[in-house]
Image (cartoon, grey):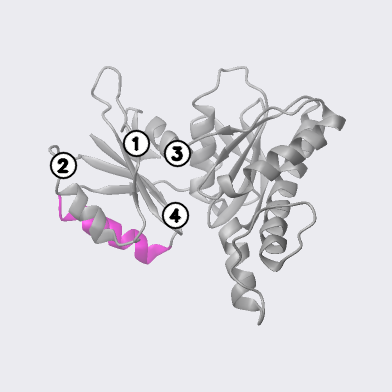
């Protein structure tokens, strides 16, 4: 049994894989720890009937968090191996100027999307709406050609509340012509997120000369889904009918599972 750990800025998600089982079964649902307390992971680990032999993970929340997770796992005899970004990972090539600078969660999540696709797949954009929103594009040749980073929906709202004297932490409906401040902020956040997705989808279609698929993930997706789908439908007039965004519950864990299923996952 190998634990799969996605240590993000807002929460810790955990899954598992049994590579010795003929069908390599996965967790039925990811476990999410919202407290960001590594000891909570250790407490949960102590309730398991089987002790995992290894933890495979990505950590973008800093060295202190990684050390805390490692210490919590070590108390249960489970070493952790952190995946880092590089120029190539299981055939997925990374065109970042400095490949190691790409967030490991981004590279591994793209690998998770790729694991679902046939060999001859369309180019695709993965939009992940977390603390930060990332929009990454992969071609049909399995090359990650680049992507955007912008504040996620919740961070946009909270930054306006913190950085201004009179703007609230908004909770209003998204509308074309807002008539109160809560509506104005919620609509502005959704418009910014949706506009970035439409931009990258159109850019991918132009770059590859064909339709690109769209995958979405992250807790912020429901907040911007309606506006994103509406704007994509409008943008599709120039590039053909856009595909409906496909929601993925745990692309980082999917990518980690693919790595964990390899003969020696600690070589990555």
Counting other residues with Cα less than 10 Å from the Cα at mark 3, is it few (<14), some (14-19), or many (20 or more)?
Answer: some
Residue 126: name its quadrant: top right
Q: Earlier in the sequence, mark 1 or mark 2?
A: 1
Please say if 32 is above or below 140: below
Which of the two discs, 1 and 2, sits closer to the camera? 1
Please say if 267 is above or below 77: above
- The residue at the point 81 percent across, 36 percent down is 234
Q: Rounded to the nearest whole Å, what is the CA distance between mark 1 and mark 2?
A: 15 Å
Counting other residues with Cα less than 10 Å from the Cα at mark 2, is it few (<14), some (14-19), or many (20 or more)?
Answer: few
Highlighted magenta segment, given as a residue range: 62-77
Q: Position of residue 170 (x, y in %)?
A: 61, 65
- Using residue 264 as the reference point, say whether residue 73 is left or right of it: left
Q: Tags 1 and 3 in contact by the CB under 8 Å rule? A: no
In the picture, the disc for residue 8 is: 4
* 238 and 77: which is toward the camera: 238
Q: Position of residue 131 (x, y in %)?
A: 53, 57
Counting other residues with Cα less than 10 Å from the Cα at mark 4, is it few (<14), some (14-19), or many (20 or more)?
Answer: some
Check disc 4 and report its element: helix, strand or loop: loop
* Residue at mark 1: 29
- The residue at the point 29 percent across, 62 percent down is 68
Check disc 2 and report its element: helix, strand or loop: loop
| Residue 15 visible within the image | yes
Q: Would you say the magenta stretch is mainly helix, strand or loop?
A: helix
């Amino acid at each position: 049994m190998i634990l799969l750990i996605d240590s993000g800025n807002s929460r810790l998600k955990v899954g598992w894989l049994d590579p010795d089982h003929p069908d390599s079964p996965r967790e039925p649902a990811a476990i999410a720890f919202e407290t960001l307390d590594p000891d909570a992971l250790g407490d949960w680990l102590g309730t398991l009937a089987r002790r995992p032999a290894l933890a495979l993970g990505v950590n973008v929340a800093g060295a202190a968090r990684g050390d805390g997770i490692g210490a919590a796992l070590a108390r249960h005899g489970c070493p952790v191996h952190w995946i880092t970004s590089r120029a190539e990972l299981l055939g997925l090539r990374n065109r970042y100027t400095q490949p190691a600078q790409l967030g490991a969660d981004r590279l591994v999540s793209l690998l998770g999307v790729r694991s679902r696709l046939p060999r001859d797949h369309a180019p695709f954009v993965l939009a992940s709406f977390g603390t930060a929103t990332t929009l990454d594009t992969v071609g049909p040749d399995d090359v990650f050609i680049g992507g955007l980073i912008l504040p996620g929906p919740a961070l946009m709202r909270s930054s306006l509340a913190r950085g201004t004297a009179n703007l609230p932490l908004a909770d209003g409906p998204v509308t074309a012509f807002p008539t109160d401040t809560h509506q104005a902020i919620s609509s502005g956040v959704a418009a910014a997120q949706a506009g970035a997705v439409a931009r990258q989808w159109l850019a991918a279609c132009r770059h590859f000369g064909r339709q690109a698929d769209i995958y979405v993930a992250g807790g912020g997706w429901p907040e911007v889904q309606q506006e994103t789908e509406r704007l994509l439908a409008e943008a599709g007039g120039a590039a053909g009918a856009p595909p409906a965004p496909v929601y993925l519950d745990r692309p980082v864990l999917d990518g980690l599972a693919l790595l964990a299923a390899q003969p020696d996952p600690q070589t990555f």
